Amino acid sequence: MSLRKPVSHNGRALKLATLAFGMVLALGLLSACGGQQTESESGLGAGTATVSTVDTSSWKTLGDALSVKTEDVASGWDDAYYIVAFKAGDSLFRVVAKSEDGIQAKTSELDFSADDYEAKLLEIIGGLEIVSVDDLTAEVPTQGQLDAMVGKTSQELIDDGWAFQSYSMTDGEETGAIFTKGYVACNVTFDTKVSSDVADNDETGANLKGAKVTAAENAGVSEDSTDPTKVR
């Protein structure tokens, strides 16, 4: 069985700490020209809270938004935008801020393993002006909605508004894949075997055709949610 690392479609750096595949994976730091990181996705989405109680009206900078953060989920940045997705209690937010020239260089100089990493990062990004705030709380599937996916085919998920993003587990008796709807993501397990070689050449999930879902769980946010080149 091969557990697959999510990849950046546009070549930005990815640093992944944990991802819920039914088990917690420890993934390392990948380097490239920009930045994106995904963290603590295993903790996202008990699926019981559908309404946010957090008041975002006073948020003007990333520092304001991050002051209520209780858990990192993901972030992505370039010299145009800096995007963070995080949990505040049971609420899930995606915040887009205007970036600055040199942000990539400044963040790349930080030592992620250092105890003061977050404080140093906040010094760099805390003053960035917020462009938009998306409250994704209501979009996170409840456990009942996840359970209702079991028995459906990949096409039925697509008919329900989900989109295939990537494979998450291959080379076993079952196959895992990340499906997204809006900015949220689920890890879905199917009752079929797909080899890693086949998966590497399947960008649409075509090899899951006819396979049925055996399990589904929340898996954080989609790759597009923190892609600064796709800010709209």
Image: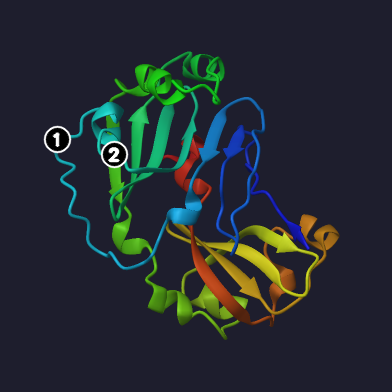
Q: Is residue 221 visible?
A: no
Above or below, comparing residue 159 to residue 75 in the picture: below
Of badges 2 and 1, nearer the viewer stands 1
Q: Is residue 44 visible?
A: yes
Whole-number angstrom distance, CA of label 2 to CA of label 1: 12 Å
Above or below, comparing residue 30 to residue 209 in the picture: above
- Dividing the picture into quadrants, the one containing residue 210 is bottom right
Find the residue positioned furthest to the bottom: 151
> Which badge, 2 or 1, is on the more N-terminal residue?
1
Mark 1 secondary-structure assignment: loop
- Dividing the picture into quadrants, the one containing residue 36 is top right
Above or below, comparing residue 116 to residue 54 in the picture: above
Residue nearest the observer in this picture, 156 or 190:
190
- Residue 100 in the image: x percent, y percent? 41, 17
Left or right of 48? Residue 29 is right
- Residue 202 in the image: x percent, y percent? 75, 60
Residue nearest the observer in this picture, 102 or 232:
102
Residue appearing at x 28%, y 25% in the figure: 129
Check the picture and name the quadrant holding the C terminus. top left
What amino acid is found at the position of numbered circle 2 in the picture? Ser
Left or right of 211? Residue 227 is left
Q: Which mark is residue 50?
A: none
- Residue 96 in the image: x percent, y percent? 35, 36
- Residue 31 in the image: x percent, y percent? 66, 28
Q: Which mark is residue 58?
A: 1
Mark 2 secondary-structure assignment: strand
| Residue on which the image places disc 2 | 132
